[in-house]
């Protein structure tokens, strides 16, 4: 890159994939500037030190960064897999420095079958020590706001759905290193206009997922939002409804620095053999929305 961008454009990489470092090596030439390593529910058999070494070897002669480490599960509950999710949060916090990352993200979890407000005491009990642990390691924690088909009244995965829930979370645990992993897709799925929300919450946004959405209003008018037909399609940026030029402008106005990492494997059209085609299009689109090629000011 000709400029050390304050906002990088990258993509998510499966940390439990067969060879994450080799995957990164193969897609580096397309121009990704950051990578976020993700884990579903548990770290599995992954040796984080070995993974960090292999990834850092691939990135050694580049200025590409690892933006975040993420684990998506339910650390508030007490089945064995839930306890593994919690141990995963702890391990990622302890090892993030090996990747050069300062963000660990994921779902908050929730008390299954209970309301969001009823889950707050358990959230505080689990995340108060995690937040201290993160602060001691120079790490920020960011909550993804996917509802995972939950509602305010009940759900299985996450309570960080939207502004009213965020108010509860950050009031219960008012830590400077606690924030959000935000994207417009989840707002649109809930029929929320992302831009006013972004302006209100930009100071709490630590990491951005590059994922958009298309709302099928004809389906809503015919079947509603709880019928048998899907009314919202998750899309790769450049194929959805959001104006990412406006989004990046608002991020900049709010002082955001960090990464927008494309969350692939969701677009219903650019999938399968077209997955990387769609992602690289999204990468190029987001770079254009960021302002295009960096042009230094005249030195006079």
Image (tube, grey):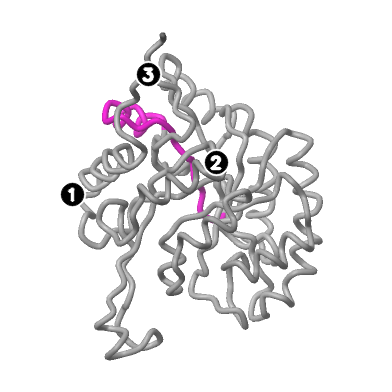
Chain-order first, disc 2 or disc 1: 2
Residue 183 place in picture, x, y as percent: 46, 56
* Quadrant where the N terminus is found in the figure: top left
Give the foreground label among 3 and 2.
Answer: 3
Please report the residue visible at 25 percent of the width from the left and 40 percent of the height from the top: 280
Along the line of sight, which residue is nearer the eye, 91 or 160? 160
Secondary element type, mark 3: loop
Task: Based on the picture, tell me whether residue 99 belongs to the magenta stretch.
Answer: no
Give the foreground label among 2 and 1.
Answer: 2
Q: CA distance from mark 3 to mark 2?
A: 21 Å
Give the foreground label among 1 and 3.
Answer: 3
Number of residues whose C-alpha sits closer than 10 Å to that of mark 1, classed few (under 14), some (14–19) or many (20 or more): few
Task: Based on the picture, tell me whether residue 29 belongs to the magenta stretch.
Answer: yes
Q: CA distance from mark 2 to mark 1?
A: 34 Å
Which residue is under mark 1?
Answer: 273
Residue that sits furthest to the left in the current view:
273
- Contact between marks 2 and 1 (CB within 8 A): the answer is no
| Above or below, 250 relative to 291 | below
Secondary element type, mark 1: helix
Along the line of sight, which residue is nearer the eye, 42 or 168? 168
- Contact between marks 1 and 3 (CB within 8 A): the answer is no
Along the line of sight, which residue is nearer the eye, 273 or 169? 169
Please report the residue visible at 43 percent of the width from the left and 59 percent of the height from the top: 184
Residue 225 place in picture, x, y as percent: 38, 84
Please report the residue visible at 46 percent of the width from the left and 66 percent of the height from the top: 187
Which residue is under mark 2?
Answer: 256
Which residue is under mark 3?
Answer: 296
């Amino acid at each position: 890159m000709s400029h050390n961008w304050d906002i990088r454009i990258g993509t998510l990489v499966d940390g439990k994939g067969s060879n994450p470092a080799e995957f990164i090596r193969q897609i580096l030439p397309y121009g990704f500037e950051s990578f976020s390593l993700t884990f579903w529910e548990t770290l599995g058999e992954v040796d984080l030190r070995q993974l960090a070494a292999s990834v850092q070897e691939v990135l050694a002669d580049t200025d590409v960064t690892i933006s975040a480490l993420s684990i998506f599960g339910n650390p508030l509950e007490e089945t064995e897999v839930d306890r593994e999710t919690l141990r995963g949060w702890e391990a990622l916090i302890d090892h993030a420095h090996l990747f050069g990352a300062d963000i660990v993200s994921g779902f908050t979890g929730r008390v299954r079958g209970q309301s969001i407000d009823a889950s707050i005491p358990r959230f505080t009990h689990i995340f108060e020590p995690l937040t201290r642990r993160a602060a001691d390691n120079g790490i920020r924690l960011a909550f993804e706001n996917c509802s995972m088909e939950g509602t305010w009244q009940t759900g299985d995965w996450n309570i960080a759905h939207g502004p009213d829930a965020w108010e509860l979370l950050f009031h219960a645990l008012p830590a400077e290193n606690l924030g959000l992993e935000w994207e417009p897709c989840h707002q649109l799925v809930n029929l929320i206009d992302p831009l006013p929300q972004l302006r209100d919450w930009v100071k709490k946004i630590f990491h951005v997922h590059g994922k958009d959405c298309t709302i099928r209003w004809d389906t809503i008018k015919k079947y509603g939002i709880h019928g048998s037909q899907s009314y919202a399609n998750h899309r790769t940026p450049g194929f959805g409804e959001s104006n990412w030029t406006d989004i990046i402008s608002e991020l900049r106005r709010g002082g955001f620095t960090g990464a927008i990492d494309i969350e692939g494997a969701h677009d219903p059209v650019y999938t399968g053999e077209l997955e990387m085609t769609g992602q690289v299009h999204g990468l190029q689109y987001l770079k254009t929305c960021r302002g295009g090629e960096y042009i230094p000011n005249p030195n006079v």
